[in-house]
Amino acid sequence: MTRKIGVLFITCLLITVGTAWGKDCTSDFDCGIGNRCVKAPLESRGICMKSVDEYGLPKYDTPSIDSIGPNMNLEGDCYFDTDCPIGFRCHPKYKTCVKQ
């Protein structure tokens, strides 16, 4: 159980996003390197957001094949702002941490 919580926290940090909201997308391949397609739970479409680490520094990850299809993570990465690193807030629709 502890390992699962740790993995969830790391995943949250990997998909935290910068302040720029992007175009509509169906996968990371629509967004390009350094961006992620962030989708609400059970949604097949989302928006491109900049990927950053817990300090707000850009991450240049390559697109993930796992981003194709609907987001089956029903719980999301956060529920409250306190679930996110300092300087981030929990987006109510996408259930992921976004940089303020």
Image: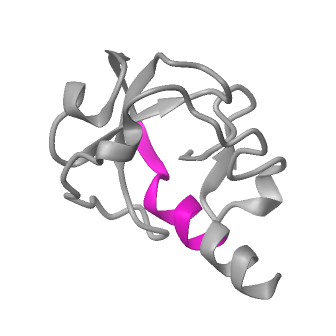
Which residues are drawn in magenta? 9-19
Decide whether residue 67 is among the magenta residues: no
- Asked if 37 appears above or below 54 in the picture, the reply is above
Residue at left 45%, top 27%? 69
* Image quadrant in which you'd find residue 27: top left
- Taking depth in this image into account, of 77 and 51 the one nearest to the observer is 77
Q: Residue furthest bottom?
A: 2
- Asked if 72 appears above or below 4 in the picture, the reply is above
- Taking depth in this image into account, of 77 and 86 the one nearest to the observer is 77
Residue at left 67%, top 43%? 73
* Image quadrant in which you'd find residue 85: bottom right
Question: Residue 24, image x and y in percent?
Answer: 36, 13
Question: Residue 92, image x and y in percent?
Answer: 75, 31
Q: As drawn, is 28 to the left or to the right of 60?
A: right
Q: Where does the N terminus fall, quadrant-wise?
A: bottom right
- Asked if 67 appears above or below 39 in the picture, the reply is below
Question: Residue 25, image x and y in percent?
Answer: 34, 18
